[in-house]
Amino acid sequence: MSRRTKIVSTLGPATDSPDVLDAILRAGVDVARVNFSHGAPEEHIGRVANFRAAAQRVGKFAAVLADLPGPKLRVKISSLRFLNAGDKVHFSLTSTPVDVSDLVITEPEMLADVRPGHRMLLDDGRLQLEAGEISDGRVVARVVVGGTLHPNKGLNLPDTPLTMAALTERDHGALAVAARAGVDWVAVSFVRGPEAADEVRAACAALGMNVPVLAKIERPEAVGRAGAIVAAFDAIMVARGDLGVELPLERVPTVQKRLIAEARAAGKPVITATDMLDSMRNNPRPTRAEASDVANAIFDGTDAVMLSGETAVGSYPIEAVACMHRIAVETESHLRHSRTPHTMSFDAASDDIDNTITLAACSLADEVNASAIVTPTLSGRTAKLVTRNRPWTPVVAVAPTDAILQRLALVWGITPVRMTPVAPGGDRMATAVEDAFKAGTVAPGERVVILAGHPIAGGPRFPTVRVVRVGEGGTSCEP
C-alpha cells in the first residue's frame, strides 16, 4: 500500500551531499524544511537549489518549507554558567548589560512584559527561575531549579503574554532570503493570534512572494485561540518542543489531538513535529516509544510527520526517513484493514455544499471500487477538501503549475500531477484523466471518480462528480 501521510525532513549538513538528497527523496521525503534559526543566507539558498535539483532528478514534486526563527529567546553567554537554587540572576532589558554579571538575551524587549511571579524557563525547562522585581533596567529572577547554563540556550516565558509584532527584524531578513530561494510555504514561529496571518502575508507580498503561510502552535495563547488561528492561516504545525515547555507536558498529547482535529475540520494541512525519532540522531534504530509516537500522530489524523535534527545533523538521515516511512505504511495498513474509523464530521454552513460533495465523491469511489479520485484543481482547494475525509482511494490532484503541485506535496494522500493546458470551453475532467494516465497513476480498464469545481475551462463553478473507465491512451469511457 502506498503511503498517505507525508514526511517533512529538515535540511542541514547531514543532507548536503547530492547522493543523500536523492536517497532521502527516494526513501520518502515529501517536504524539505529549511530552519532559518541556524545557518547563513547563502547556505539556505544553496540547500533549496540543491533540493530542487534532487527532486527533479528523482522525478518528484516536493515542497520547500521556510521555517522563520521568530522571537525565540536565547541567552547570549560565551561560556558555561552555574546557577544554584536560591541564586538571584539579573536579566538586562536591553542588549547592553547594566552589570557584567547580567544575562543578555536575544530580543531583550520581550522582557518588558514579564511580571513578578512569572516563570522563566531556561534550556527547555531544565533550569527554572521565578521573576521578581523589575528595576534599574533589569529583571531580577530567583533560581528555583538550578543547573548548568550553556551558551545560546533558550528562554521560555510561559506565564507572560507577549505583545510584540508577529515578525521580528530577523524574521524579515529570513523572509527576504526565502523569497530569493523560491520556497513553497512559510512557517511562522510563536504565533499568538490570527492577526499574525495578515502581517505575514503583507510582508511576503512586499517581497513579491505569494505563498501559503503556516502557523506554528507553541504558545499557550495560541492553543486558546486555535480555532481562529486555523481559520486565518493556510496550515498549522503542532510544534511540541516549545509547546511542551510552555504547557505542562501531560497536556501536550491531548492538545495535539485537538489541534489536528481543528485543522482537519477546516481542510487545512497539519504537521506534527519535534523529537519524533530523536534517538536516530545517533542510532540506526529508534526507541519503541518514538515509533509509537509517530504512529499515534497518524492515528490522530495528521497530514505530515516531521524530522528535525534526525536529518539535519544526525548520523543516519536516510535510515530515519526510511524508518518513518515504514511506520507510516504499517499504521495506515492497520487503519485501513481494521476498518478503524478515520473520518470525522465537519460543521459547514447550510448553503455550503463542498463538504457534502467531497464526502459523496469519497463514498462513491469506495462503492464503485475506483482506483483513484482525480481532482483537476487550479488552487489545490478541491483536493484538500477531498483528503480531509481521509479516503483510502488514492487522490490524484491535477494542477497546471509547479507552485501548486509542490504546495500539495504537504497534504495527506495527494499525488500531484501536472495538467495539460485546457482551452476555454474544454473538458477539464477528461483532460485530468488523460494527465493522470500519462503520469502512471491510473491505467486502462480502471474505474475512476472525477471531482471538479469548474468542469469546463473558463466556465462557471458547477461542482461536478463523474465516474468513468480509463480507456486506451487515458481517454474517458463509459464506466
Image (cartoon, grey):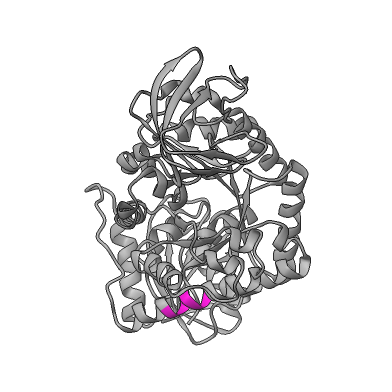
Q: Is residue 227 above or below residue 353?
A: above
Q: Is residue 33 left or right of residue 331?
A: right
Q: Residue furthest bottom?
A: 445
Q: Residue furthest left?
A: 350
Q: Nearer the viewer, residue 15 or 251?
A: 251
Q: Is residue 347 magenta?
A: no
Q: Quadrant of the C terminus?
A: bottom left
Question: Quick check: can you spot residue 184?
Answer: yes
Q: Is residue 341 above or below residue 184?
A: below
Residue 297: x percent and y percent? 39, 64
Residue 369: x percent and y percent? 37, 83
Q: Name which residue lies at 45% across and 69% down.
A: 290
Q: Is residue 329 magenta?
A: yes
Q: Name which residue lies at 51% across and 25% down.
A: 91
What is the magenta segment's predominant secondary structure? helix
Question: Quick check: can you spot residue 397?
Answer: no
Residue 401, image quadrant: bottom right
Residue 218: x percent and y percent? 42, 44
Q: Is residue 314 left or right of residue 103?
A: right
Residue 232, image quadrant: top left
Q: Nearer the viewer, residue 223 or 438?
A: 223
Residue 46: x percent and y percent? 77, 51
Q: Name which residue lies at 32% across and 61% down.
A: 357
Q: Is residue 9 above or below residue 2?
A: above
How many numbered tags mark residues here? Answer: 0
Magenta-drawn segment: 325-330
Q: Residue furthest top?
A: 136
